[in-house]
Image (tube, helix red, strand yellow):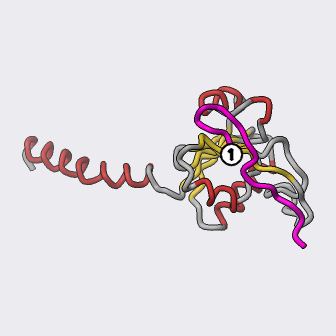
C-alpha cells in the first residue's frame, strides 16, 4: 500500500472512530466517581449504581477538595465522595431515587447528602435510615430536595 493510501486509510479510520468515542464519553448513564483510595463505602455506593445499570468510572484521588470546588460543591455540607453525572454532581451517598429526579432539573448544579449518614446507600442501606438530600442551585443556593425517612 502506498504512503498516501495508508495516510488516507488512517485518516478515514480516525474519522469513523471519533464519533463512537464521543458517544461513549457523552453516555447519559455514565458516572465518574472521585473518591479517596482508602474509602470502602464510596466503592459500595458506586457498585450499587453499577448493578442498577449505570456505567461507573472510579477515579481515586487524594485531593478531593479541588474537585469539589471546581464543581461548586458547598464545602460546609460536603459528603464522602463526589460523582459527576450528566454534567451535575452527586456529593456523598445520594440515593438512586434522587439521582433519577435530578435528571430533569437542569436548574441545579447537583445534590448533596452531607456527611455519611448511617443507612444511606453504601452505608448499610437501612430501611430505617433518615436523612436529607440537599439541592444546590447553579447560583449556590441550597434547599432540601428530598427527605429520606423510614419506610412504614
Closest to the observer, 100 or 135? 135
Residue 13 position in % (x across, y down): 23, 51
Answer few, some or many: residues within 10 Å of disc 1's Cα (few below 14, many 20 plus, some between 14 and 19). Answer: many
The correct choice, above or below, for 14 with respect to 148 in the image is: above
Is 11 above or below relative to 128?
above
Identify the residue at the far bottom of this view. 152
Residues drawn in magenta: 135-152
- Answer left or right for 87 relative to 33: left
Query: Where does residue 26 sit, x and y in percent of width and height?
Result: 44, 51
Q: Secondary structure at mark 1?
A: strand
Q: Quadrant of residue 109?
A: top right
Question: Quick one: 21 or 100, which is closer to the camera?
Answer: 100
Would residue 60 be found to the left or right of residue 39 on screen? left
Residue that label 1 marks = 111
Residue 125 painted magenta = no
Q: Is residue 139 above or below residue 103?
A: above
Q: Residue at x 65, y 56 (%)?
A: 99
In the rendered view, does 128 fall on the left or right side of 9?
A: right
Q: Quadrant of residue 80?
A: top right
Q: Count all numbered tags in the image, as a single digit.
A: 1
Question: Which of the two residues, 78 or 61, is positioned nearer the viewer here?
Answer: 78
Residue 78 placed where, x, y %?
A: 77, 36
Q: Position of 32 compared to 116: left or right?
A: left
Give the residue displayed 81% in from the left and 50% down from the top. Answer: 132
Residue 17 in percent (x, y) is at 30, 52
Q: Is residue 140 magenta?
A: yes
Give me the residue at 37% from left, 49% from top: 22
The image quadrant where one finds the C terminus is bottom right
Amino acid at each position: 500500500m502506498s504512503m498516501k493510501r495508508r495516510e488516507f486509510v488512517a485518516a478515514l479510520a480516525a474519522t469513523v472512530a471519533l464519533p463512537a468515542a464521543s458517544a461513549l464519553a457523552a453516555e447519559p448513564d455514565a458516572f465518574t466517581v472521585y473518591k479517596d483510595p482508602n474509602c470502602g463505602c464510596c466503592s459500595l455506593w458506586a457498585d450499587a449504581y453499577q448493578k442498577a445499570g449505570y456505567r461507573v468510572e472510579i477515579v481515586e484521588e487524594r485531593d478531593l477538595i479541588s474537585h469539589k470546588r471546581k464543581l461548586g460543591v458547598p464545602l460546609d455540607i460536603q459528603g464522602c465522595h463526589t460523582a459527576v453525572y450528566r454534567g451535575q454532581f452527586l456529593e456523598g451517598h445520594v440515593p438512586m431515587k434522587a439521582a433519577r429526579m435530578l435528571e430533569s432539573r437542569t436548574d441545579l448544579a447537583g445534590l448533596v447528602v452531607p456527611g455519611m449518614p448511617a443507612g444511606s446507600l453504601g452505608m448499610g442501606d437501612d430501611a430505617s435510615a433518615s436523612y436529607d438530600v440537599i439541592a444546590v442551585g447553579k447560583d449556590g443556593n441550597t434547599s432540601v430536595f428530598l427527605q429520606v425517612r423510614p419506610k412504614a
